[in-house]
Amino acid sequence: MANKRWFHAAAADELLPGERKVVRVDGQCILLVNLAGEHVAFESVCPHQEAPLDTADIQGEVITCLFHGYQYNIRTGENLYPAAVYPQNRSCRKQFLRPLVVCSVAARTDGIWVALPAGK
Ligand code: FES
């Protein structure tokens, strides 16, 4: 766990599958989700226009921002929508289709630990 800033996010059995928890650390808001028994975590901020994702809809691995409907894979951070409507060769893709910032997660006997995104 060297070189990353880890914090204790939840007890090992705190979240049931499908449940989520918002954790605030050093001014950052991290959303921890029990995804069918595996925990994933990411910044709870939409990369589009920085809306909070705390209460956003999550179906499987896909989170949908309530503001404009952008969708992201919560495991990889990949923008799923509207990526498909932007041609691959358009330079604006990087600006408008930034990925969700995902965090490393470690399940230990003393709980679920999350690493803050690099540079934060
Ligand atoms: S702020 Fe989330 S889709 Fe626009």
Image (spheres, rainbow, N blue to C red):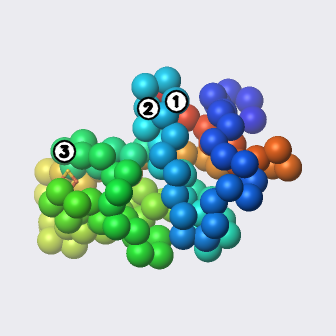
Residue 117 location, x and y as percent? Answer: 51, 36
- The residue positioned 30% from the left and 65% from the top of the image is 64
Q: Which residue is mark 2?
A: 28
Instruction: Point out the residue furthest to the right here.
Output: 109
Instruction: Point out the residue furthest to the top here.
Output: 26
The answer to whether residue 118 of the structure is visible from this angle is: no
Residue 57 location, x and y as percent? Answer: 34, 67
* Image side of residue 63 versus residue 49, left or right: right
Q: Residues within 10 Å of mark 2 (few under 14, many from 20)?
A: some
- The residue positioned 82% from the left and 44% from the top of the image is 110
**Along the viewing direction, whichever of 53 and 80 lies nearer the viewer:** 53
Label 1 close to label 2 by CB (< 8 Å): yes
Sequence order check, earlier mark of 3 and 2: 2
Residue 111 location, x and y as percent? Answer: 76, 47
**Along the viewing direction, whichever of 112 and 14 lies nearer the viewer:** 14
Q: Which residue is mark 1?
A: 25
- The residue positioned 30% from the left and 46% from the top of the image is 52
Q: Is mark 3 within 8 Å of ligand 1?
A: yes
- Label 1 amino acid? Val
The alpha-carbon separation of the residues under discs 1 and 2 comes to 5 Å
**Along the viewing direction, whichever of 114 and 87 lies nearer the viewer:** 114
Q: Which residue is mark 3?
A: 49
Q: Is residue 41 above or below residue 17?
A: above
Badge 3 marks a residue whose secondary structure is: loop
Sequence order check, earlier mark of 1 and 3: 1
Q: Quadrant of the N terminus?
A: top right
Residue 18 location, x and y as percent? Answer: 54, 70
